[in-house]
Image (cartoon, grey):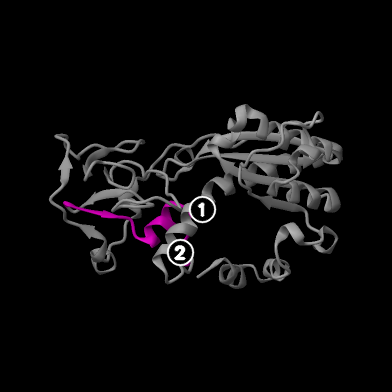
């Protein structure tokens, strides 16, 4: 299932906009009014020639298209997510351009790197979350959600039906395990061994720890998920297990192509983290409204 089919199934109204073509070519005036704009974009190099370090410096990047929509529609909240390294990309210049641009457009800018493992999900997935409030909302005290204790590990997210995962098991002569026992739980990933030379996608982890960061790309026998020791055998994660580790409920329908599913979950955001941030957004909006009464 490609992106178009996903939108058709879950967000048909958004699909209507997407079918108009490349977002860089869509007239922002034709986009429906909205209260919240959610966006993500590549951290490609932003111009360093501009003196203002704001809206004009973002030209030529996908963020410029986010900015022009914000400029036209003025949503109450702009919620953006990116990889952890976005915060330090180009020595911090890229993040500074985004911040200055949003301030120039009339928004208060907040940003913080959050790790999924700190919000109940056993996966090391650090992402920067940028929340911007329109200035007339007078939001001055927004805070990001506080971490919560981790009570689950990878083993709690595995499928019970072995028939669904039997094709994922790997039995190779060049599998090497470290001389450590797999009997302790941890809030970190626990590497137990390797396949081949132990490169990316060739490492084996314990299900009593947390998952490594799911990836949309990468090679190796355990590509995109990493390998795990399950019932004494090694395998990568099943797409449904990836969905669970990203916070998706089992009612979520996964595309039939495993490769596409792995890529989609590797590119996705962790639902639980989004929910926690959204709750804090709701709290500060409600508190500010009460103070204004």
Outermost residue to the front: 49
Mark 1 or mark 2, which has the lower sequence index?
2
Q: Which mark is residue 267?
A: 1
Q: Quadrant of residue 177?
A: top left
Q: Is residue 2 left or right of residue 143?
A: left
The percent coordinates of residue 133 (x first, y second) are: 77, 41
Residue 111 found in image quarter: top right
Residue 45 at x, y percent in the picture? 64, 38
At 33% from the left and 51% from the top, the residue drawn is: 156
186 displayed left or right of 69: left
Q: Secondary structure at mark 1?
A: helix
Taking the magenta stretch, the answer to whether it contains residue 241 is yes
Q: Magenta stretch: give its range.
A: 232-251
User: In the rendered image, which residue does mark 2 sit on?
Assistant: 260
Distance from the alpha carbon under mark 1 to that under mark 2: 11 Å
Along the viewing direction, whichever of 3 and 279 lies nearer the viewer:
3
Q: Which mark is residue 24?
A: none
Q: Is residue 83 left or right of residue 111?
A: left
Q: Position of residue 134 (x, y in %)?
A: 81, 42
Image quadrant in which the C terminus is located? top right
Q: Secondary structure at mark 2?
A: helix
Q: Residues within 10 Å of mark 2 (few under 14, many from 20)?
A: some
The quarter holding residue 95 reads top right
> In the displayed structure, would residue 170 be above or below residue 176?
below
Q: Which residue is nearer to you in this view: 109 or 45?
A: 45
Taking the spot 69% from the left edge, 66% from the top edge, the residue there is 18
The residue that appears at 31% across and 61% down in the rendered structure is 159
């Amino acid at each position: 299932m490609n992106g178009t089919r996903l939108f058709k199934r879950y967000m048909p109204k958004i699909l209507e906009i997407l079918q108009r073509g490349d977002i860089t070519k869509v007239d922002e005036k034709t986009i429906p009014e909205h209260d919240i704009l959610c966006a993500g974009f590549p951290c490609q190099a932003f111009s360093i020639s501009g003196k203002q370090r704001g809206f004009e410096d973002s030209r030529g990047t996908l963020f410029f298209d986010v900015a022009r929509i914000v400029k036209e529609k003025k949503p109450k909240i702009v919620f953006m997510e990116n990889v952890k390294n976005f915060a330090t990309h180009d020595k911090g210049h890229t993040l500074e351009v985004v911040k200055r641009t949003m301030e120039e457009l009339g928004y208060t800018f907040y940003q913080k790197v959050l790790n999924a493992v700190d919000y109940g999900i056993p996966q090391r997935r650090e992402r920067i979350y940028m929340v911007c409030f329109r200035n007339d909302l007078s939001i001055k005290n927004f805070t990001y959600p506080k971490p919560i204790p981790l009570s689950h590990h990878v083993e709690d997210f595995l499928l019970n039906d072995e028939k669904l995962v039997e094709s994922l098991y790997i039995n190779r002569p060049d599998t090497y395990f470290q001389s450590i026992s797999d009997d302790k739980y941890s809030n970190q990933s626990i590497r137990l061994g390797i396949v081949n030379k132990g490169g990316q996608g060739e490492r084996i982890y314990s299900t009593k720890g947390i998952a490594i960061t799911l990836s949309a790309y990468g090679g190796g026998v355990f590509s995109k998920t990493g390998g795990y020791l399950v019932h004494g055998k090694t395998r990568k994660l099943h797409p449904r297990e990836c969905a669970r580790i990203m916070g998706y409920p089992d009612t979520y329908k996964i595309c039939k192509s495993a490769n596409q599913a792995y890529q989609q979950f590797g590119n996705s955001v962790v639902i639980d983290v989004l929910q926690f941030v959204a709750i804090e957004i709701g709290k500060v909006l409600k508190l500010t409204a009460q103070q204004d009464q």
